[in-house]
Image (cartoon, rainbow, N blue to C red):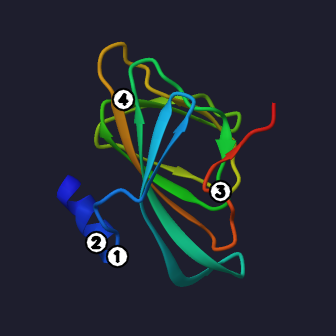
Amino acid sequence: MIRSLLTFATGLGVGIGGVLAVHHDGEHVRTISERNITEKLDGKDAKVTVVEVTLEPGQAGVPHRHPGPGFGYVLEGEYELGINDQPSQVLKQGETFYEPTGCLHRVSKNPSVKGKTRVIAVVLQPRDAKEIAIPEAK
């Protein structure tokens, strides 16, 4: 499965080396690749960003939104995901998820007390978007 993901990423022109690493509260977010694509997103020029999100045991990220649709794959551990007002769910290694454009990603958590969580996310967004994740106002 990881080989398939890497093959997919290679097809997007994704490099394996990290470009940028950012900490958002309990999340460590490392940008793997950011690339302009020819497809449009809501009529705008678009780009695709691939990130790796790492959460230590019990850690959680802040509620946020993405400027485009996102697809995720749990590489390691368990990942608690809550979108909009839907009940949160715990995903296990090898499972995937989808986030529609602009939805509230209200829960992003490692529910484990022992092991870390690693998630690969592929987010499409307008090229002029300033951030891949926009923190929700309190």
Q: Do the CB atoms of the residues marked 2 and 1 lie less than 8 Å apart?
A: yes
Q: Residue at x 51, y 51 (%)?
A: 98
The amino acid type, in three-letter code, at marker 3 is Glu
Q: Residues within 10 Å of mark 3 (few under 14, many from 20)?
A: few
> Which numbered dot is residue 10?
2
Disc on the earlier residue, 2 or 3? 2
Which amino acid type corresponds to the residue marked 4 in the rendered image? Glu
Q: CA distance from mark 4 to mark 2?
A: 25 Å
Of pointers 4 and 2, the one earlier in the residue sequence? 2
Q: Residues within 10 Å of mark 1 (few under 14, many from 20)?
A: few
- Whether residue 1 is visible, yes or no, is no
- Element at label 1: loop
State the separation of the CA atoms marked 2 and 1: 5 Å
Residue 73: percent from left, percent from top:
37, 48
Residue under numbered circle 4: 78
Toward the top, the furthest residue is 113
Locate residue 27, reporting x and y percent. Answer: 49, 34
Looking at the rendered structure, the secondary structure element under dot 4 is strand
Q: Work out how far the residue at label 1 is from the one at label 4, CA to CA, in angstroms.
A: 28 Å
**How far apart are labels 3 and 1 at the CA level?**
21 Å
Is 36 rendered above or below residue 65? Answer: below
Spot occupied by residue 55 in the image (x, y as percentages of width and height): 42, 30
Q: Which residue is mark 3?
A: 131
Could you tell me the amino acid type at mark 1?
Answer: Gly
Between disc 1 and disc 4, the foreground one is 1
Instruction: Name the residue carrying label 1.
Output: 13
> Which structural element holds mark 3?
loop
